[in-house]
Image (cartoon, helix red, strand yellow):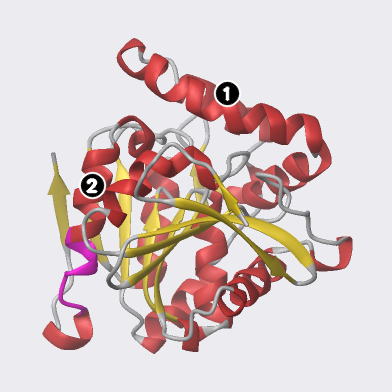
C-alpha cells in the first residue's frame, strides 16, 4: 500500500512488523541506509533530509518507530531500548533487507540504533549517531558534571523549546515538527511521555564499549549549538567508543531539518569514509 509524500524520491509504504502495521519511507538505489527518527517525531519529519540521501546514491529506509507516526506502540513488556532494537531487527526482515545496513539514528533514534547494533550485530555494518542520546554525563546549571539520569525532564523540554527559537530557521523547522509532533501527542500521549523518560535515563556506556571491542565502524555527528544533547553527553559517548571518527557541524539539535542539504553531504561522506578496520585511522573532522 502506498502513501503519498511530498518527495518524488521517496514513497510511503506499509509493512507488518511484529503483527502490527508500520509506515515507512523508502527510495533510492545503492548502499542500504536505515534512518531512525528522534523523540516525538516520525519518519515523514525528515523527508527532505532523507531525499538528499536517496538522491545521492543510497537506498534509504525510514520507519515510523512504535508509538509514533501511526505505528502501533510497543507493549508494556517490550517497552525498553532493547524492545525497540528488537523491533528494528524485525522491521529489517519484514521489508526484505538481508544484507548488513548503515544504521543512522538521530537523538532518541541514535539510542535505539546503538542497542540494535549491540543486540543484532549481523544486521549492522556501520553506525552513524547524529546528536544521539546514550552518553552517561550531563553538566547541570552550576557546571557540575553528573550522571545523565539526574537530568530533570523539564530541562530536556526547556532546551528543546530553545532549540527552535532562532528566527532564521523557526519558520522552516517548526511547521515540520508540529505536523508530526502534535498528532503523536494527541493519538498516543502515553507513548510520547514514556519514550521521553526512556531517553532521559538512557546510559549506553556498556553497549558502546562493547561496540568498540567489536571494532564496529561508528561515526559520531554532533552540532556545536546543541543544548538538548549537550557537549558533556556527547563527550562521554565518544569516550565510551574510544575516540571514534567524529564530525562537528554548525547548528542546533534540529540542524538536519533546517539544513537537509548539509545532512545529505555529511552522511554521503560518512558512508564513503574508510573505516578504522581498513585504515587504522580515527579522529575528528569539522563540516561547515
Residue under pointer 2? 248
Which residues lie in the magenta part?
269-275
The answer to whether residue 236 is magenta is no
Q: Can residue 135 be seen at all in this image of the molecule?
A: no
Residue under pointer 1? 158
Give whichever of 277, 12 is nearer the camera.
12
Image quarter where the N terminus lies is bottom right
The residue drawn where x is 13% and y is 77% is: 281
Would you identify the image quadrant in which residue 90 lies?
A: bottom right
User: Given contact means CB atoms under 8 Å apart, are the residues at marks 1 and 2 in contact?
Assistant: no
Image quarter where the C terminus lies is top left
Against 29, is 117 above or below? below
Which residue sits furthest right? 76
Report the Cα–Cα distance between label 1 and label 2: 23 Å
Would you identify the image quadrant in which residue 187 lies?
A: top right
Q: Position of residue 116 (x, y in %)?
A: 55, 73
The residue drawn where x is 63% and y is 50% is: 199
The answer to whether residue 272 is magenta is yes
Amino acid at each position: 500500500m502506498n502513501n503519498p509524500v511530498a518527495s518524488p524520491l521517496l514513497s510511503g509504504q506499509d509493512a507488518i512488523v511484529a503483527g502490527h502495521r508500520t509506515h515507512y519511507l523508502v527510495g533510492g538505489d545503492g548502499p542500504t541506509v536505515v534512518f531512525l527518527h528522534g523523540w516525538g517525531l516520525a519518519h515523514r519529519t525528515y523527508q527532505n533530509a532523507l531525499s538528499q540521501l536517496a538522491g545521492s546514491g543510497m537506498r534509504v529506509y525510514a520507519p515510523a518507530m512504535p508509538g509514533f507516526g501511526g505505528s502501533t506502540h510497543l507493549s508494556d513488556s517490550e517497552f525498553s531500548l532493547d524492545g525497540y532494537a528488537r523491533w528494528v531487527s524485525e522491521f529489517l526482515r519484514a521489508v526484505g533487507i538481508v544484507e548488513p545496513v548503515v544504521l543512522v539514528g538521530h537523538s532518541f533514534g541514535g539510542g535505539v540504533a546503538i542497542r540494535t547494533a549491540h543486540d543484532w550485530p549481523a544486521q549492522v555494518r556501520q553506525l552513524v549517531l547524529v546528536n544521539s542520546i546514550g552518553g552517561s554525563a550531563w553538566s547541570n546549571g552550576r557546571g557540575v558534571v553528573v550522571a545523565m539520569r539526574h537530568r530533570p525532564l523539564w530541562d530536556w523540554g526547556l532546551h528543546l523549546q530553545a532549540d527552535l527559537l532562532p528566527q532564521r530557521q523557526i519558520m522552516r523547522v517548526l511547521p515540520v515538527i508540529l505536523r508530526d509532533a502534535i498528532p503523536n501527542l494527541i493519538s498516543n500521549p502515553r507513548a510520547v511521555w514514556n519514550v521521553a523518560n526512556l531517553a532521559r535515563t538512557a546510559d549506553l556506556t556498556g553497549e558502546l564499549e562493547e561496540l568498540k571491542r567489536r571494532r564496529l565502524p561508528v561515526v559520531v555527528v554532533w552540532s556545536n549549538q546543541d543544548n538538548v544533547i549537550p557537549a558533556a553527553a556527547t563527550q562521554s559517548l565518544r569516550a565510551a567508543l574510544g575516540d571514534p571518527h567524529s564530525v562537528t557541524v554548525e547548528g542546533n539539535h534540529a540542524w538536519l531539518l533546517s539544513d537537509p542539504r548539509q545532512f545529505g553531504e555529511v552522511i554521503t561522506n560518512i558512508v564513503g569514509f574508510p573505516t578504522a578496520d581498513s585504515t587504522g585511522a580515527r579522529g575528528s573532522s569539522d563540516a561547515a
